[in-house]
Amino acid sequence: MYLSPHLDDVVLSCGGTIYRQVRAGERVLVVTFFAGSPEDDSLTAFARDLKARWGGAEDPVAVRRREDLAALAVLGAEGLHLPFLDCVYRQDPRTGEALYPQEESIFGEVHPAEAGWHRELLAALEARVGSLDGAKMYAPLTVGHHVDHILVQRLAFALLRRGAQVLFYEDYPYAGDTQAVEAVLRTWPELCWSSETLFFSEEALRAKQEAIARHASQISTFWANLEDMRRAVRAQALRVGGAGYAERFWWIRSGCLPAEESC
């Protein structure tokens, strides 16, 4: 089970590994948390800019959900979309003001109004999928420090405290910056991180590239065009793998998990 903040994060970060797992006969479920359509997608100038960037559809998040299912079908994975709103649409329940009104704020700190919100996310996950016992979980490492990724990581820490098996994936394309990855690991030096590099084939790489291409509304956010995307994704897989294509995952060694209040 892959825990995805948004409707492209897991495909971008783990597409090669998922393709390999499915071909080996494993069932893969990708759960996207912030996949709900807002009643008002023009809350801020930033939200209006995103709507235009994503194609200007009446419901751009619905378009993104369809793109995500098409992308996961390329990899052979299943998808589950939860109805929580992306941070750009969330409002303070007391004042109605946008919690994250600017692009800079989504890469800042989690708003105090959402300090314990990961517990609600976890409850919603369990309500939809039932028991999580026995599932191998993958969660964002939070490279790039996006607040939605941080909330899902906090959920993953809660699962770890309950004895779940959780690996953390390097959030791409933010993970294209090696210093950004190192910055995350330095944030939690007491966690005693270890890593595993998982290699995959040329066929898997091409499947990952094709899956990313299905997220058509998102391409211009990170790349000039599809060919630019394909070159960048190949280069990243080689950078991680060295002699072959790979993605890297991290886990926390036993005894190194932080107290909940420190997250």
Image (cartoon, grey):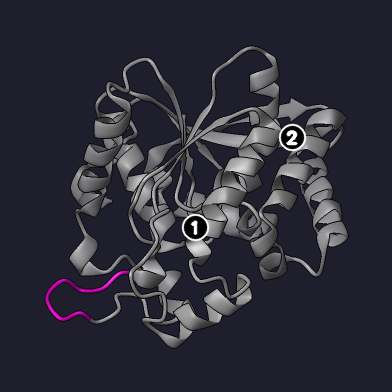
Residue carrying label 2: 246
Residue shown at 22%/38% (left/top)?
123
Real-space CA distance between mark 2 and mark 1, rounded to the nearest whole angstrom: 31 Å
**Is 135 drawn above or below residue 223 in the view shown?**
above
User: x, y percentage for residue 58?
Assistant: 50, 71
Residue furthest to the front in view is 58
**Is 104 drawn above or below residue 8 in the view shown?**
below
Residue shown at 71%/43% (left/top)?
211
Labels 2, 1: front one: 1
User: x, y percentage for residue 119?
Assistant: 21, 45
Helix, strand or loop: magenta stretch? loop
User: What amino acid is at disc 1?
Assistant: Ala
User: x, y percentage for residue 167?
Assistant: 48, 32
Residue furthest to the left in view is 94
Residue shown at 53%/75% (left/top)?
51
Q: Is residue 124 left or right of residue 191?
A: left
Count of numbered tags: 2
Q: Is residue 107 left or right of residue 20?
A: left
State which tag comes first along the sequence, 2 or 1. Answer: 1
**Is 250 drawn above or below residue 171 in the view shown?**
above
Residue furthest to the bottom in view is 45
User: x, y percentage for residue 110?
Assistant: 31, 65
Q: Quadrant of residue 219?
A: bottom right
Residue carrying label 1: 62
Q: Residues within 10 Å of mark 2 (few under 14, many from 20)?
A: many
Q: Is residue 94 magenta?
A: yes
Read off the magenta span. Answer: 90-96
| Secondary-structure class at tag 1 | helix
Who is closer to the viewer here, 233 or 64? 64
Q: Is residue 48 left or right of residue 132?
A: right
